[in-house]
Every structure is written in C-alpha cells, then in structure tokens.
Amino acid sequence: MKKSLLALAILGSLAGVAQAQSSVQIYGTVDAGFIKRTDQSMAIGKRANNTLGFKGTEDLGNGLKALFQLEIRYEPDTGTIEQGAGGIQRPLFQGQSRVGLQGGFGMVRLGRGLTAFQETSTQFEPFHGVPSPAGFQTDLTVAGYTSDPLGMIANSTNRFSNALFYNSPEIGGFQINTTVATKESNQGVAIIGRGTAAAPQYGPSAAASANPYSVSATYKNGPVAMMLAAERNAVESELWSIAGSVMATPALKLMASYTAQDQEHTRLLNPETDSWVVGANYTMGPGKVLIGYGQKTPDGIAKTKQFSIGYEYSLSKRTYLYFDASNKKSGITATNTINIKHYAVGVNHAF
Amino acid sequence: MKKSLLALAILGSLAGVAQAQSSVQIYGTVDAGFIKRTDQSMAIGKRANNTLGFKGTEDLGNGLKALFQLEIRYEPDTGTIEQGAGGIQRPLFQGQSRVGLQGGFGMVRLGRGLTAFQETSTQFEPFHGVPSPAGFQTDLTVAGYTSDPLGMIANSTNRFSNALFYNSPEIGGFQINTTVATKESNQGVAIIGRGTAAAPQYGPSAAASANPYSVSATYKNGPVAMMLAAERNAVESELWSIAGSVMATPALKLMASYTAQDQEHTRLLNPETDSWVVGANYTMGPGKVLIGYGQKTPDGIAKTKQFSIGYEYSLSKRTYLYFDASNKKSGITATNTINIKHYAVGVNHAF
Amino acid sequence: MKKSLLALAILGSLAGVAQAQSSVQIYGTVDAGFIKRTDQSMAIGKRANNTLGFKGTEDLGNGLKALFQLEIRYEPDTGTIEQGAGGIQRPLFQGQSRVGLQGGFGMVRLGRGLTAFQETSTQFEPFHGVPSPAGFQTDLTVAGYTSDPLGMIANSTNRFSNALFYNSPEIGGFQINTTVATKESNQGVAIIGRGTAAAPQYGPSAAASANPYSVSATYKNGPVAMMLAAERNAVESELWSIAGSVMATPALKLMASYTAQDQEHTRLLNPETDSWVVGANYTMGPGKVLIGYGQKTPDGIAKTKQFSIGYEYSLSKRTYLYFDASNKKSGITATNTINIKHYAVGVNHAF
C-alpha cells in the first residue's frame, strides 16, 4: 500500500516520531509503606509523591533545546490518580505539564507546575519536601500558604496553572526563578473572604484579581546555599521567605528557613502567619538521618510545633527503605492544641 | 525461584512482552501559547491538540500486520485530561483507541477514533485541522455537524465509539475509507429534537435510531488531491462534503471545501446548513504562511464569516513557533452578529 | 549552564533516571470484538481485560530485586478508563499498582492488586479468567463472592486496596500466596446488611470490621496442578475453594474447581452459595478449543447453569482471533430463571 492521503493525514500529526523515539524518557517513583497515627488505625500509604512521567529534550542547534515534561501522579495503595481532600481526584498530570525552550538565556516554559518558591524551598527542608506529615514542607515551610486558591476543588496548593516559568542561568553562583500566571478562571469554588456567603469576595469560577507570581533567588558558594523568595496568589495573599543551608562536613547538611504570609486581602482578622524550620541531614554509609524542628505562629491561634526524625537506608541508588517518627502539636484555638504522633516504615523505588 | 503457578499466572497475561518491547512507540505533542480574544482576558492555552500516545505494529507474515494505537489527550495549561464544554473531562484515550489488521486488502480496525470524513477533511483545511478558533475545522469545515450527538456529555464531536474502521489500499490514486458504528448506547444526555422536554425524541442514554456511518473517497494525482464524503450520525443528521487541493507551485498549496448538513430528522425549522472554506499554505524556508476564508450559512440565522492568517516558524522538524490572527463574525439571530478577534503566539513540540 | 540549585531540585526527585531507563517495560493488550446477546443489540466490546502497563525490576545484588508494576485498564470501544457498573470509571491503575522486593524468601509487595485467591484461581478456569460472560471466572468460579465490598462504587470486586502481598518461593512443587489488607476506609457506599436503611451495618466510607485476607496454596507435580484457597473480605464474608488441573495429553488440559461462600455476617437469610466448574482446553496447531460447564447454587434461588465453548486462533504469539458461544440460565427467584445466549468474535493483541 503506497502512502495514501489518509495515511499521510495520520502520519502528519506525528511528524518526527522516528527521530523523537530515542528522546522520550519514562521515569517515576513508587513509594508505599505502613503508617500509624495516634488518631487512626494502621494504614498503607505513601511518604513521597508517586509519579510516572514522560519527558524529553530536542537539540535545536546553537545551544538551543526544546523540552517537555508530563508527570502523572497517583496513589499506589488504591490505584487512583492522586487524590486531594475528600478523595477527589486531581489532574492526570498533577506533577507537571510543561513545554519550553532552553538556551544561554536560561529556560522558558509554559504550562502548569510548582511555583518558583515552592520548587526551590524543598532544598532547605530536612525531609527534602516529601508530603508526609513527618515532613515540614506542606504545612510549616510554606507558613500555611496556598499557591492556587482559585484552582479546581482539592487541587494541588503549590502550583500555578496557565503559567510562564523562567529560570535564569546560574551566574557567579546566583540564579533567578520566576513564575507568572494569567488571571484565567479554572472552575474553582467560591471564597467568601471579606464578602458574605451571599456575595463572596471571589465567586465560583472567579478569575484572579491580580496576576499571580512567584520569584526565588538563590546563591550558591561552595558548601553554602541561600534562597530569598516572594509570591502572590490569585486572591492576593502574599508570602516571602528566606532560607539557607551549609554542608558543615561532607556528611552533615544543616538548614533553616523562615516564611511569612500576609492574607490581608481576604481576611479582616489574623491575616499574618509566620513559621520557621531548622533541620539536619547526616549521611552514614548507605544510611541517612533526617532531623527537623519547626514552629508556625498563626496570629490568634496557639502555635504549631513539630519535631520529626527519619532514617533512609539505601538498597541502591534508586531504592531505599525509610523509617519516620514525628510529633506535632497544632493549635485549634488560642489556647487549645491537638497532639498527633506519626510513624511510618516503607520503601521508595525510582525507575 | 522456579516459575511457580502464580508466576505463570502473572506472566501468562503478558505473553510476548519480550518480543513486543521493541514495537511500542511513545509519541505525542505539547502545544501551548498565549491567547487573546477580544472578549476575554489574556490566557494560556493550546492551538493544536495535545497528545501522548502508544502505538505499535506486529509483522504476522505474508504481508499481514497487527496494529494498535492508544492516544491520551490532555490540557498542558491545567494538567488535566482533555476537557470539553464546561470543563468536563473527556475519555482518557480521547485521541483514539483502536486495534486491527493491515494487509493487501487495506486496514481494518475496531474501537474509537475520528470518522472517515472527519479524518480525511483535515487535509483540505488551511490550518491542517487544529481546534484553535483561528482554524476552520471545528466549526466551518464540518458545517456545524457533530458525529457523536448521543455520546457522553462534553465528549468529542468528531468521533465514533463502538466502530469498525476500514481503509482500502490506494489503487490508481483512489482510496475509500469507511467507518460504521453499532447502535449501542453510550450514557448520553437526552436530545429533545422533534419531541418535547417531557418526551424527548432521544431520551437519556438513548441508542442510535440507525447505524452511524461515514465514508470518504479520495483521489490523488501528482499535485492534485480531491475528496468526496458522506456521513450520518446516531440521530440521523446527514452530511456530505467535497474538497480539493492543488500544489500550484512546490511551495504553494491551494485548497477549498464545501459541506452541507441536513438535520431534518430532529429539526422542524431550519434543518439545512452549508459552508465553504478556501485557503492557501505558502512555504518560505523554515516558515509557512497559512491563510483561509470561509462562510457558514445556517438557514434562518445570519451568515458566519471568518478570515484567518497564521505563520509557523520551524525550529526543527519537530518544533515550531506559531503566530495567528483571526476575525470571525457569527450569526446570533437572522440579522444580529457577534464579532470576535483571536490572536495567539506559542510553541508546538512533537516527540 | 552549570547545575543550579533548582536544576538539582528538579533532578533530585528523579535520581537514577539514567540507569532506570532500560528497566521500564511498557506492555499491554488490546481486545475488541463484536458481541451479540439474546437480549441486546449488536455491540462492540471486549472479551479480555484491556491493559497498558509499566513495570520494571532492579537488581540490588545478593539475589535481591526491587520491582514495581503499574497497570492502566481501559475500554477500547469508548476510549475511557475501565468502567464498572453504570459506566462509572474505575481507578486509573485498575490492573494493579504495587512495589516490592523479591529474593530467596519469595516476593513481598505493597499496594493494590488481585487477591491471592482471585489471581491463582484463573489457572483452573477454562477461559483463563477473561471477564467476558462466555467465561466462568467473574460469576461462577468465585461463587458470587466479592473481595472488596467497601471499595469505591463500581470498583473492581476481585482486588484488595491497601494491602501487603506475599508469594513464597516454590519448594518441592508447593507455593503459598497471601494477601492481607488494612482496615482503612476507601470512600465506599453503605451496606445495609443486618442493619436497616437508617442504620446500615456498614455506613458510608465504613472501615473494615476485620482485616481482609486471602490465601492460596498450590501444588504442581508434572502434569498435575492443585489449589486450595481461603479468603475473608472487609464485611467478613468468607470463601474457600479447591481446584485442580491435569494435562491429560500434551494437547489436552482438563480442569475443575469448587467454591463455597458464606455471607452469614451480613445476611440473615440464604447466606450460603456454592459453585463448581469443569472445563477443558484442547490445542490443535495454532487453534485452541475452550469448553466449560458450571453451576452455582445460591441458597433460596434457582440454580445458575452455564455452558460455553470458545475457539482461539493464533496469528502469532501475541495476536489471536476468538469465537465464543455461551448459554447461561440464571435464577431470579426460587423457581424462575432467565436464559441468555452470548456470541462474540474478535481480536486480541498483546504488545
């Protein structure tokens, strides 16, 4: 059969498949373990995010590259797409979905992914950003801030949809990362804010009242790394953060971060929240100890205080076992707190 | 460990994996850009469909091949599976899901995919069938026709589910493509048609009242290509179409199409719609100019008139930048129209 | 561009991708055919499950391996994720989502997959466990039992979520397979059971009242294979099963199974169900004949009786055509039955 019109039609949309083949990388992680919390029965669940991704780069010549990355997120204990609050499924490519160009000017991408602040800050968190309650990233490192308050219900809180991502090259140890989103609506639920239930400040499927943006600047000099970051979301909550780390010895990394959030645009009372986290990672042969302590001070409610210790034992470069123990006291009212202990043991396998 | 019963059970369902490995191709496209419409704020979105596909062929000997293709469609700006009206997610393999055999007799496939008409007609559309409002395919080329009126809500309008697809070999420049679907119900919503809200012509989850079919015949002779097509959907709307193209010079492709739809089976008033589109593609080195003009005449409403110009600049065989500008006047009533300008700039990367 | 902090952040989560690449296998099946039942119009659908999977193993040294498997299930006739009752979509990785370790001790995995009984029993079913009504697995082989009564609505009935899977090595022809699940809730619907509509025995999103478990023991000796299995689900329905097969000649496999279910924990009346199935597979060159007969005796309702014959013709090791004919009489009341004939012809392609 010669190449017919229809065959050309089918092939047309796939131009370059033959060349492209070698460049699509499939990667991912599977993380599952036993989890015991003081207030819940034994469960099987995750410590880190579970991913199945597809990515590639194409050399365009003259140092220019095209690149894309699509990352599925899922729950291995139930087989579903990653779930948010109430078991609601998040987007298929919850991890990220971006396309862009890279060259001497840095990297420009369009799509959806972690904001500059959210992505950079994981480098200064003692549990390298895992969403487990044993880690600090999700609650304390970000001072309770959410990057996407107008996104679809139960969606991720640390990403921008409809965004332009720019990462500068690193010059003299300095690098700038920025994320700017459009004001587009994304089928979000209403936010009462300074309005009323009848007339919420942001109605259902509201558009952003200002362009959300996120900036992180980093500096690296030998064993020292630092970050300064600022972000504003679609309902004009503002955040700034400073963090640093130092390799005190080749085996010991010390780190600290401070973050402040201002929700004045949507809150009359208690608009200020701040938090700090200190931690250490100590490597001993195939094992690594993770230790952290942090506090969050929401204006008007008792402080959150968390202490966590973890141990990761590498079976290979791609596979490790982990053991976590954590104690967290969270404020409910100005004087009342709730105390939850969290234990986990499991396996993390990258492919 | 010897191969146990259970191991055999597990392996049994994957027979031939070892041989199969080399034959699975991963392919796709990521398309994202900035979009500005006269009636909306700046947005980030797509111009072309975004795909992530898996396909393969197996040589069965004697010129016979088995083949399959599974194609995910998604939205890179939000990371979700492709969304239809109201943000409702379409099927995971919205692109297509088909399995079949190919040989001297042509190609036979079962599953879900574009109908013969919908697939062939993109060859005669000046924006090669992209769903962007700058293109003509979605609205004008098909004269407002939908191939799947009884499909799930917000589903694609140019595919058949539960269908048999046959493409003949090309003989003397001629080829015939046919698609026939069963009458099975697909959880669709009710269509009032010539009935009433209380007694709709097609109730919820209605079966087709006749087998949907689609036929396209093509003829290719040197620089000339032509198409003649007819289709009938599950509620017996009928369509026919004629189209042609000519490579006037090696760099200049001229094309035109005419399509008529008859919805007499479900409409008392104004059952006739027809449309025509003319266009040109002009290639200049790595750049290509796309120009088109078209009109749609729905009986009883003012004409739709659209003019679009686009420019595609190839960075490689797999990656191009695009710039579109379009002006569309659509009829609302017999005398009133609405005018929308559409601008887009973005990148399309195939992998 | 040197590796910046952010680049390290991005790369960090993908550690080992380079080494991993070679180990991810993509595999799957596409099965589609024409189906005619006495009580329905001609349809296009599946006979076997349709899968698209990703799996891999990593050699950790000393005979130890890490392994993972993620298996998408879908419907090729409509392009959707696999659908349960009412067209409701099941989890993305409906096939399985598991990670674990394998060594001299056997195989340990965490996640979601077929229970030990459900997986082993397919080896003794004349249609090798296909979900088609022509097969016996889904209804008769399991005596109407469901492994996951508290799972999400329309979910699979033969899997455990939140489970630990252990398969022993085969020693002297013996092997033990076990699955144990936590009591975690999975957003299931209420089960009235021995309660009332107002006070169901298991409320919405109920936790299991006991840890679900499944055990299958197998013995293999030359042409003979045997299975003994027991299982208890989250609402304490209990099942036990015995099955055996023998290769009477190199081309003829004979098999039989008996299964009993006790639903006393949730039913006052008629808690007992038992079933038996006998069958044969006969191979002739590229063709294989499948024959089976079985009965199910639910206490208080007329017996279910099913006879099925199938023929599979291999075009290659990965692709076969199939032809099925089946007659099933099912009890509606103590004396009334309904009789359904089922015919199918289609193609199954593994990749």
Image: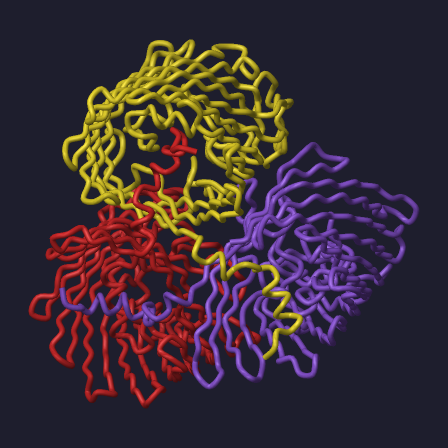
Chain colours: A purple, B red, C yellow
Q: Is residue B89 above or below residue C139?
A: below
- Where is residue A216? Give x, y as percent: 71, 73
Residue drawn at the location 34% of the way across and 36% of the way down: B12
Q: Residue at x 85, y 50 (%)?
A: A305
Q: Residue visible at 57% across and 84% down?
A: A105
Residue A203 location in percent, x, y?
66, 60
Residue sitting at x 42%, y 59%: B73
Q: Nearer the viewer, residue C33 or B246?
A: C33
Q: Is residue B212 left or right of residue C117?
A: left
- From the viewer's side, name the closer residue of B321 and C244: C244
Residue at the left extreme? B172
Residue at the extreme right: A335
Please indicate whether residue B191 sits to the left or right of residue A48 in the image: left
Q: Nearer the viewer, residue A310 or B82?
A: A310
Q: Single out the residue that lies furthest toward the front.
A: C62
Task: Work out whether A234 lies above or below C46.
Answer: below
Left or right: A75, with A308 as reference point: left
Can residue C275 be seen in the rendering of this structure? yes
Q: Quadrant of the N terminus of chain A?
A: bottom left
Residue closest to the eye, C3 or C243? C3
| Residue C292 place in picture, x, y as percent | 25, 21
| Count of numbered labels shown in the rendering | 0
Q: Is residue C77 visible?
A: no
Quadrant of the image occupied by residue B349: bottom left
Q: Is residue A253 above or below residue A171?
A: above
Expressed as whole percent of the image width and height from the top left, the position of residue A183 reads 62, 71
**C170 w.r.t. B147: above or below:** above
| Residue A86: quadrant of the picture | top right
Position of A146 compared to C228: left or right? Answer: right
